[in-house]
Image (spheres, helix red, strand yellow):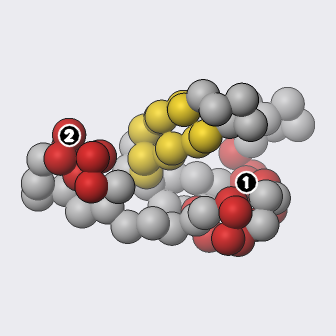
Amino acid sequence: MDYIKKILKQPYSINLIFRASKHSFSAARFHDYCDDLNDTLILIRTEFGKTILGFSHYKWNEKNINKDGYFIS
């Protein structure tokens, strides 16, 4: 987390909202914590040791995701 804060430089604040290993590896639980939040930084560590990083200005909302997992505007 300190590394990400250093890259972004202040005045950004970073708060851990959801950790799958703590809150359950479930899309429904993710949406319980993250729906209606915008400007989110997503950091994913895959089962193969790869790291994926993403950022969204859009609010998370389970209703905006289609059955294939794609964002619907």
Give the camera-side residue of 47 and 17: 47
Q: In this view, does 20 lie to the left or right of 12?
A: right
Q: Which of 7 and 34 is in front in this view?
A: 7
Mark 2: amino acid: Ile
Classify mark 2: helix, strand or loop: helix
Where does the image place residue 20, in percent across and percent down from the top left? 68, 60
Looking at the image, which residue sits at the far right? 67
Q: Is residue 17 above or below residue 3?
A: below
Could you say which quadrant of the image residue 31 lies in?
bottom right
Nearer the viewer's eye, disc 2 or disc 1?
2
Mark 2 and mark 1: Cα distance apart in space: 30 Å
| The C terminus, quarter of image | top right
- Looking at the rendered structure, the number of numbered marks drawn on it comes to 2
Residue highlighted by disc 2? 7
Mark 1 sits on what residue?
Answer: 62
**Residue plotted at (12% across, 47% down):** 9
Any part of residue 57 in sight: yes
Residue drawn at x 70%, y 63% as measured from the top left: 21
- Find residue 18 and report its horizontal and vertical position in percent: 58, 65
| 10 Å crowding of disc 1: few (<14), some (14-19), many (20+) | some
In the image, 23: left or right of 7?
right
Name which residue lies at 43% across and 38% down.
Answer: 55
**Quadrant of image for the N terminus:** bottom left
Task: Report x, y in % for residue 51.
Answer: 54, 32
Residue 17: x percent and y percent?
51, 68
Q: What amino acid is labelled 1 in the image?
A: Glu
Quadrant for residue 62, please give it: bottom right
Q: Can residue 32 be seen in this view?
A: no
**Residue at position x 78%, y 66% in the image:** 24
Residue 7 vertical position relative to residue 33 in the rendered view, above or below:
above
